[in-house]
Amino acid sequence: MRDPVNVSVRTQQPSLFVYEADAGNGHGVYGVTDIYEVAACRMVCALRTMPPGASAFIRQARLDIMVRPYPSYRYGSVVVRGWRDVDTGTLMIVDADGVSSAGEAATARGGSAV
């Protein structure tokens, strides 16, 4: 039996949220936060400044400190997607369950307002 003092224990890191918004012209907004609402607000704010056709998403991630030589993120599933409609410029948001929201006041989860 192994000595429990010498066994490496990996505690599960808290979930992070990675947001990416791409204007489609080489410009974008990218970031990481541990608060979903912050990621949603930043994604929506970025999309509002971008031209029609821009797209964005938020996905979960964890920081894996055991990766060598440098820690890195382990990405999980996409929890929400957003885009500016090409024809109308309307901000569209769809969560992982397929629930959509439209309009400038829409944010990510369930269509709640920012």
Image: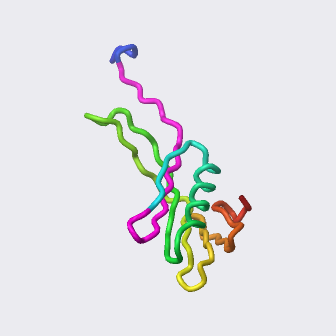
Q: Is residue 46 left or right of residue 73?
A: right
In the rendered image, the vertical position of residue 5 relative to residue 69, given as above or below: above
Depth check: give the residue in front, 90 or 75: 90
Image location (x, y in percent) of residue 47: 56, 66
Q: Which residues are magenta?
A: 7-27
Outermost residue, left side: 69
Query: Residue 29: x, y in percent?
Result: 48, 57
**Residue 34 screen position, x and y as percent:** 56, 42
- Quadrant where the image shows the N terminus: top left
Along the line of sight, the residue nearer the viewer: 47 or 40: 47
Task: Tell me: residue 80, above or below residue 14.
Answer: below
| Residue name at image x 61 percent, y 60 percent | 45
What is the quadrant of the C terminus in the image?
Answer: bottom right
Furthest residue to the bottom?
87
Q: Residue at x 40, y 46 (%)?
A: 74
Picture coordinates of residue 2, whole percent (x, y): 33, 17
The tally of labels here is: 0
Quarter-of-image position of residue 24: bottom left
Q: In the figure, is residue 16 to the left or right of 64?
A: right
- Residue at coordinates 37% horizontally, 33% vertically from top-left? 65
Residue 1 seen from this side = no
Q: Is residue 24 magenta?
A: yes
Question: What scheme was used to colour the molecule?
Answer: rainbow
Magenta stretch, main secondary structure class: loop
Q: Residue at x 67, y 71 (%)?
A: 101
Relative to 79, residue 87 above or below:
below
Can residue 112 be seen here? The reply is yes
